[in-house]
Amino acid sequence: MSEVLNFTPIDEIEKIRDELRSGFASGKLRDIAYRKYQLVRLMYLVKDNSVRFEEALKKDLGRPVLESRMLEIHPTIGEAKTQWKNVETWAKPSKPSFNINFFAMKPITRKEPKGTVLVISPFNYPVWLSLGPVAGAIAAGCTVLLKPSELTPHTSALMTELISKYLDHDVVRVVNGAVPETTKLLDLQWDHILYTGGGRVGRIVATAAAKYLTPTTLELGGKSPVVIDPKTDVRLAARRILWGKTVNAGQTCVAPDYILVPRDFQDKFVDALKEVYEEFYPDAAKRSAVSDSYSRLITPQATARIAGLLERTQGKVVFGGEVDKDTKFIAPTAVKDVGPGDSLMSEEIFGPVLPIVPVDSIDDAIKFINEREHPLAIYVFSQDDQVKTKVFDRTQSGAVVANETVLHPGAEGLPFGGVGPSGYGMHTGQYSFDMFTHFRASLDSPGWIDAILKFRYPPYNDAKVKATLNIAPSLPKRPLGPPTKGGSKWWGKWFFLALAVAVAGLTRAKRLN
Ligand code: NAD
């Protein structure tokens, strides 16, 4: 139990879940206008209290205001607004494409809320990763229980206070706590669980969910690599990579974890990185330790873990390296000549330390990535489209991004999620709405259909068996062999057609002459 955050008594947790179930059963969220009302209230919950959120985030993470606004407050309001703006369209029943056998039965996909859902969120973007999914759940018409991180007590206490003030008690509730409280939550049945956090706990969540066959979305982490092509604007690359690594002190699930750079380009990249480091934190005497532009690590334990990785590295520290465990400070640090078996390559760093791993070539970098677990993001810095395409096409990850870092989860309309060990399922925008929605198939078949489909009823006979041919699907033309590389070019056909028309026209003109 923390001084600022009251943990929910364990014996109250089931009652809270049951009240949310009653809230769902009341049917008030069937009314889209009511969902929209709650979503606007959610937007104002954040807007009216943005300064309080900024202060809470400062206390919990030492987070500079700019980072809180850009990566937390605005995206949370933006996500609620996207849900609010689109909910009518997304909630509309949809018709499948025309099918002669079924169209008369009025096939429709109904978009129905799954029920009462559980959202477990992490410490690193505690507002966005809590209230963003809550917005998606409300838009979908679900009641939702939020379990925020105990590691951000000021922010979690503020969200608890404001949710009870701004949102319907029957629709959204909060349970605060650590492992025992979350374990109790996971003992209960839910209609969907969205978990964001590390893979170790992700496995605990998935195992608990399996007991009830609860659909689950796991938003996990991993080591997201950056591939540097020498054909790149090296200053721009250094700036965007160092920003992605130092924002929130590297505690971003899609932060660039390590760099893969062709060996003979490593020093040029390191020089650019050093210049950018001095540009970002210009006061050499103070450096980032007292900079207003730099967050802190979340706990002394997290600081000690990363400091330990740094102490054991066989690489060469090129800048940074200062650690102050008492103030949870680790300076932005770059380490070059890092080998594949180095301590810095043993786990997701989740802090402001950037290992640089020299490789022989871009192909070697791709091989390096493919020999490891699929990450949440892969970045490539290049001005050569062929290099970008190669990295995009020959690797697998939650997302793949050229010439940028960290911003893609905020891009409206794109899914946010992992693949393999970086998680399953996806969210934000319509993907969140769909995650909390049951796509319910429906038909309404008229009696006259039996004039056509009566043959299905026993007793079967030869005539009835023959009648099944009337509903057999037609096939595309039988192929003569496997496709030839490149196939026929569409413009080739048009060229020959145009040529034939021209020849025919000329022949006719000649004849008329
Ligand atoms: P975490 O797994 O330690 O904690 C997340 C949540 O799980 C918290 O609410 C916590 O109370 C709960 N929890 C912790 N131990 C538990 C247990 N034994 N049983 C049940 N619940 C438990 O994660 P974290 O340290 O808060 O976040 C860091 C990790 O999250 C990183 O790996 C990061 O990459 C990942 N992450 C992923 C995304 C994404 O969208 N994919 C976003 C942010 C963070």
Image (spheres, rainbow, N blue to C red):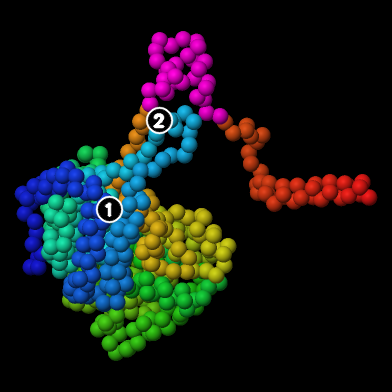
Q: Residue at x 33, y 41 (%)?
A: 110
Judge left or right: residue 100 versus residue 161: right
Bounds of the magenta segment: 446-474
- Quadrant containing the N terminus in the rendered view: bottom left
- Residue type at mark 1? Ala
- Magenta part mainly helix, strand or loop? helix
Residue sitting nearer the eye, 348 or 113: 113
Instruction: Please rate how many residues cluster around mark 2, counting C-alpha atoms within 10 Å: few if below 14, some from 14 to 19, many from 20.
Output: some
Residue 87: x %, y % from top left: 32, 53
Q: Residue furthest right?
A: 513
- Above or below, comparing residue 286 to residue 93 in the picture: below
Query: Would you say residue 218 sits in the magenta stretch?
Result: no
Mark in the foreground, 1 or 2? 2
Residue sitting nearer the eye, 234 or 194: 194
| Residue pointed to by mark 1 | 139
Q: Could you tell me if residue 308 is visible in this image?
A: no
Query: Would you say residue 473 sits in the magenta stretch?
Result: yes
Mark drawn on residue 105: 2
- Residue type at mark 2? Met
Residue 286: x %, y % from top left: 28, 87
Residue 423: x %, y % from top left: 33, 52
Quarter of the rendering containing residue 18: top left
Residue sitting nearer the eye, 336 or 498: 498
